Amino acid sequence: MIRVSAGSAACMGLKATKMDVYPTTAYLLSGNRCLMNCAFCPQGVGDKEALNRLGRVTWPEYSWSDVETGLSRAERNGVKRICLQSVRYPDGVESLLKLVARIKNISSLPLSMSAWIKDGREAVQLVEAGADKVSISLDVVNHAAFKKIKGGDLQERINLIFDCAEKLPGRMSTHIICGLGENEREVLSIIDRLVKARVTVALFAFVPLKGTVLENRDPPALDSYRRVQAGYYLLRNNLADFSTFRFDHGRLVSYGYSSSELSELLSGGVAFRTSGCPSCNRPFYNERPGGIIYNYHRNPKKHEEEKARLELIQSLPVHS
């Protein structure tokens, strides 16, 4: 059995679901009861209901035969990538290598792999097995918060990502969740280093999930998330340098542009779209339909991107 996100299941013909926009990546989740015990995630000690969720998305279980048939349908329905996410297994990557090979035997779509790996050798093995991208999640970018929420040492995790990035140029990615004790300087500082190392960053807004330690924690403020989104967009597109960013007690107050210049650079709304691997749109992973949109899973409508730009610019000092 393997879990499939509800939207992906619809694209794969496994479930009848009407959606505003369907996923352009087929999201699969392997395993239950992760050996890790991250305070924001239900996959470690969560109850049965909690195990069916990641973010705001439900992940029903399907047989491999259903998934194999569904992946061929998904490609015909506009899905352009497969993302295999995995809990931490007792046998490390051995099980994952078999899963990657199995998926590549039935689909020609590029495959992203998100897994707990211990060294660069394992990342190379996953790529050699067929993974197009390998993600090592940071999730939390404040050192004290990382130790409390995920356990272990943040610097060791960062060092592992950069070591893998040297071995696999352009193939590595990571996840960063905003709203877990970091400030904007901390998150944009590490994003700048990751961009320069050609590591793809997928930005998430923290989602409080029932059954987790952090179920009562608030999501991040939207204006703060917008400032980080815009900073990442400018950095990854070589439109700004981190040295031009200005902060006040960890809060970003200037990108080094005037309001009019910044508005022009951010026109079109791409900065506010879902970030991560190519063709990854993660519909409603962070959002409730009709609620606050942190990551637009489609091109924002004109009034949406204008609103996002205005909210961002108004959150900065007048002289920015």
Image (cartoon, rainbow, N blue to C red):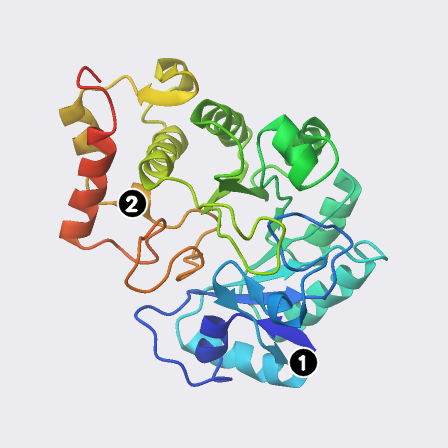
- The quadrant the C terminus occupies is top left
Q: Is residue 164 visible?
A: no
N-terminal of the pair, mark 1 or mark 2, is 1
Residue 178: x and y, percent?
Answer: 47, 39
Q: Residue placed at 72% from the left, 49% from the top?
A: 116
- The quadrant the N terminus occupies is bottom right
Vertical position of residue 21 compared to residue 16: above or below: above
Q: Residue placed at 51% from the left, 30% from the top?
A: 182
Q: Residue 138 appears in which quarter of the rendering?
A: top right
Q: Residue placed at 31% from the left, 53% from the top?
A: 292
- In the foreground, 125 or 255: 255
Vertical position of residue 168 compared to residue 76: above or below: above
Q: Specify few, some or many for label 1: CA neighbours under 10 Å numbering under 14, 14-19, or 20 or more.
A: some
Q: CA distance from mark 1 to mark 2?
A: 36 Å
Mark 2: which amino acid?
A: Val
- In the foreground, 267 or 47: 47
Residue 8: x and y, percent?
Answer: 48, 72
How many numbered discs? 2
Determine whether, in the image, residue 48 is placed left or right of residue 270.
right
Residue 115: x and y, percent?
Answer: 68, 52
Q: Residue 137 appears in which quarter of the rendering?
A: top right
Q: Is residue 102 visible?
A: yes
Secondary structure at badge 2 equals: helix
Vertical position of residue 104 compared to residue 126: above or below: below
Q: Which residue is mark 1?
A: 64
Secondary structure at badge 1 equals: helix
Determine whether, in the image, residue 31 is placed left or right of residue 311.
right
Q: Which residue is mark 2?
A: 270
Mark 1: which amino acid?
A: Trp
Residue 291: x and y, percent?
Answer: 30, 58
